[in-house]
Amino acid sequence: MRAGKSAPAAILPFLWLALFFAFPFILVAKLSLSETALAMPPYAPRLDWSQGLAGLKAFFTALDGETYGRLTKDSLYLAAYLSSLRIAATGTGLLLLIGYPIAYGISRCPPSVRQALVMAVILPFWTSFLIRIYAWIAILKPAGILNAALATLGLPPVDILNTETAVILGLVYAYLPFMVLPLYAMLERQDESLIEAAQDLGATPLKAFWQVTFPLSIPGAAAGALLCFIPMAGEFVIPDLLGGSDTLMLGKVIWTEFFANRDWPAASAVAIVLLATLVVPILLFERQQAKVLS
Amino acid sequence: MKRGPSAFNIASVVLGLAFLYAPIVILVIYSFNASRLVTVWGGFSTRWYTALFQDAQMLDAVWVTLRVGVLSATLATVLGTLAAVALVRGGFRGRTALAGGIYATLVMPEVILGLSLLLLFVAAGLPRGFWTVTLSHATLTLAYATVVVQARLATFDRHLEEAAQDLGCPPWKAFALVTLPGIAPAVAAAWMLAFTLSLDDLVIASFTSGPGATTLPMRLYSQVRLGVDPKINAVSTLLIGLVATGVIAAYLVQQRRRSTR
């Protein structure tokens, strides 16, 4: 084997990620320890290289955890933190419930049909995310399509746009392909003879499913759950467009602090808190992927 | 013997697909609605398309978005293919770090990615605009491109390339002449995916863009916030049509290739 041959190929992507992905996190961490200032860019202290070592020292002594202190004083941040996790967890649970039967159904179809169905699940993902969420506004708004449909059925109207329900619906809708695909990949790979063996030994189809198919599909479910939970916890577009002013999520808080309040240190501190919370799920996801790869 | 799908299996797939497609279908239908109101069908009309093509700001945004998309997707595909080769073939230190970086980008909330990239550009003193969005999108889509190419490369027979090397071909040439044509469909798919993601991104573009580089999602977002505008349905329908045609064509080509093999 020609070991080490691929090292040159790794150099460019490695440097790219180091510069554009890893290094900026140090800047976010630094900024979360800074303070807002009436300047452009709107924060202090700024590193002054012209003063040499003294400038460096002055810079580091000016950094403090004051911004984090501010976060703990305002209950809005804690509420946003908890509701982000709650909404992402609810969404992930619903995605598992809805995604599993779909993935399982596809895996039971003949191979030729399966391919087309997988394609059909992926296709909406290729159309604009923003536009798909926008479509839900037209459906859910008080004088929208859903209520028109309910009225023709003689049912009372529902008013769920700008509520947490709408946010969860939007999340489930947008992330469904990310749940179905890893689940399907696991189910499709399963050895059919295992089920037959269970049934030959007297298991009912339902029992064979619960004791053979389902346990074997858990890695797929875990991959799907992590793939959905992590980005959903920091989601911005869906809570912004479908949620109300009382639907608090960290992604929205970061956006508002940055764009509306021009409070870059607060936005950075919230980003660091979110990142710290997501580190464990991200590491779990990476371990999962490494297993699939090897 | 594979057992066929049960009624429950069929029902879940059909309902699942209906859920995925209903909003898209509704959007397309109402882009041809003469009435401004979503719930009132005012007859078939293409007036929103006409209005769209007279909206200079919107067309401007489309042009910026396409240029950013092509450039960033090309960058991401080159980097992603290199990363995929490195990951699949291994044998170097730092492989875990590279894989870790790739998978972390894949799931990282966009707000965090956008904010951190913006701080990088501010620290570097780069003026925000076309180039900063392009670099940011290349970073975002690099991970997706890697995963797509990597999946194909993992099943590609390496012995072909090794045979070429044994016959005296330099490694880079063996890769370009033997492996690259073999994985070309995956590389093309990676480019398409990166391009689509770039076309679609609102959050990262909002953080890293500057004056004169307003992308289509940024323009759409500011319109959507003002309320439902049928012009958005029209532009969405065009985008959906464009992407669907591309993806279905790619799928059919692949199917034909598979059946002739």
Image (cartoon, rainbow, N blue to C red):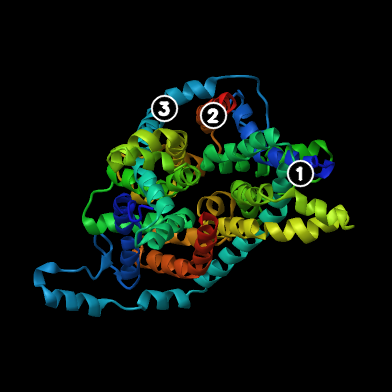
> Which residue occupies the foreground of this view, A208 or A36?
A208
Residue for badge 2: B254
> Which residue occupies the foreground of this view, A223 or B91?
B91
Which amino acid type is marked by label 3?
Asp
Residue for badge 1: B12
Which amino acid type is marked by label 1?
Ser
Chain that bears disc 1: B
Residue B198 seen in the figure: no
Chain that bears disc 2: B
Which amino acid type is marked by label 2?
Gln
- Foreground mark, 1 or 3, reads 1
Task: Name the residue: 56% across, 54% down.
Answer: A239
- In the depicted structure, whether residue A191 falls above or below residue A258: above
Q: Are marks 1 and 3 on the same chain?
A: yes
Would residue B5 appear left or right of B160 to someone viewing this image? right
Element type at mark 1: helix
Would residue A281 appear left or right of A156 to someone viewing this image? left
Q: CA distance from mark 1 to mark 2?
A: 28 Å
Q: Which mark is residue B55?
A: 3
- In the depicted structure, whether residue A1 falls above or below residue A107: below
- Mark 2: few/some/many CA within 10 Å (<14, 14-19, 20+): few
- Mark 3: few/some/many CA within 10 Å (<14, 14-19, 20+): few
Chain that bears disc 3: B
